[in-house]
Image (cartoon, grey):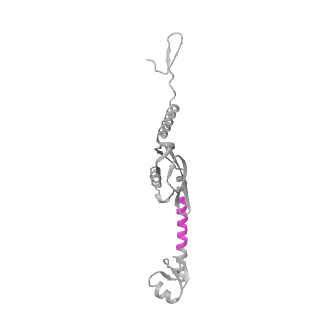
Amino acid sequence: MKVILQENVENVGYVGDVLDVADGYARNFLLPRKKAIEANLRNVKALEHAKRVTAHTAKKIEHDLRKWADQLSAVSLTFPVQTGKDDKLFGSITAKDLEAGLLTEGFEVDRRNIQLAHPLKELGTFPVGVKVHRDVHATISVSLVKAGEQAQAQEAADGAEETEAAPKAVNATVETGETPVEVGRPQE
């Protein structure tokens, strides 16, 4: 008897398989327990339609996940860390820390999907893989810097933005022949 399996049956087959099994096995075990249905023309067409719909949905979901993975790959995380002698870290950066960092960037990722072979224990920049779906992966950049250096770098960047945004006021005295005029300060 031909049947279509409705659930995985050990040593027989998987969901959606069309199998030819013994009549007694089908009548006495598979059909009464709703593990399979008879493979008549109507049920086979319904199965084919369900497979097409499932494949289309899976393709759309995978496309959306690829877009999300591209956005995730653009993320770069920087962790200021305390270091000791010879730039050895006090502690380490783990998948849990990366999960929290990604959450602050607006990406909710389960730490079990962050593919970190071992905790990061040294200064530098490291690529870290993130499993988005079984066929979709992303790579983020993780930088570990000394805590003091990050603050200095941030201040230097802020200072550079201020100098570019506003022209420097020059305090100089220009001799015009009559009275000295100071440049850079408003006249009274």
Residues in magenta? 50-65
Q: Position of residue 124 (x, y in %)?
A: 54, 46
In the picture, the quarter occupied by the C terminus is: top left
Residue 106 in the magenta stretch? The answer is no
Residue closest to the eye, 48 or 147 = 147
Looking at the image, which residue is at 49% across and 40% down? 150
Name, please, the residue furthest toward the top. 178
Residue drawn 51% across and 26% down?
Answer: 168
Q: Is residue 82 above or below residue 43?
A: above
Vertical relation: 95 (above or below) 54: above
**In the displayed structure, would residue 20 be above or below residue 50?**
below
Give the camera-side residue of 36 and 143.
143
Farthest-out residue, front = 85
Q: Position of residue 103 (x, y in %)?
A: 45, 52
| Magenta stretch: dominant secondary structure | helix
Front residue of 168/13: it is 13
